[in-house]
Image (cartoon, rainbow, N blue to C red):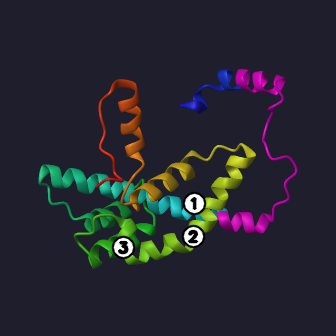
Amino acid sequence: FLSGLKEERVQAAEVYKKLGLAGRLGGNVKVDKQQLVDDVRKALYASKICSYAQGMNLIRAKSLQKGWNLNLGELARIWKGGCIIRAIFLDRIKKAYDRNPGLENLLIDPEFAAEMVERHEAWRGVQMKAVQAGVPVPGISASIAYFDAYREGRLPANLVQAQRDYFGAHTYERTDMA
């Protein structure tokens, strides 16, 4: 959406430039370029795992809801032969579902989980550097948020309940008293 708002973005850039916030942030921060390239590669790979995990999870949820009994490993194999998604990565997804046909999410497959653990520091580092420099990385940021939310037993949604109660007396259930 934002990419289509070129005139507005140019206008916003000028407003903020006048207020002393121009261009990229972070100034002349020294960066090991080769390390950054390696970290970005790891970050993109981790984000790709999350994207596929989300997509397969959505398909799985709809299949369960509608009683379709879809074979997600077979879907990955079929897509590999298509014209849009031909990634070798789909072979790995198929293998994950072959190992565990009832796999709820790729993020809990042992091989994918190990890769996420191996890459998470670089992934977070890339996001932090981007935020510090004022470089938008929405795909990476959203993937990290999904990953972090997915692996938490208790989400901060309770804060939303407290806010609703504060503004509209909707009541909430305390989690520290359970």
For disc 3, the marked residue is 109
For the residue carrying disc 1, how many other residues have a C-alpha within 10 Å: few (<14), some (14-19), or many (20+)?
A: some
Q: Seen in the image, is 120 located left or right of residue 99?
A: right
Q: Amino acid at mark 2?
A: Arg
Q: CA distance from mark 3 to mark 2?
A: 15 Å
Task: Answer left or right for 2 relative to 83.
Answer: right
Q: CA distance from mark 1 to mark 3?
A: 19 Å
Q: Secondary structure at mark 2?
A: helix
Q: Which mark is residue 44?
A: 1
Magenta region: 10-39
How packed mark 3 is, by other alpha carbons closer than 10 Å (few <14, some 14-19, many 20 or more), is some
Image quarter of residue 105 = bottom left
Q: State the residue at coordinates (77%, 26%).
A: 16
Residue occupied by mark 2 = 119
Q: Quadrant of residue 173?
A: top left
For badge 1, the amino acid type reads: Leu
Taking 59 as reference, is 44 left or right? right
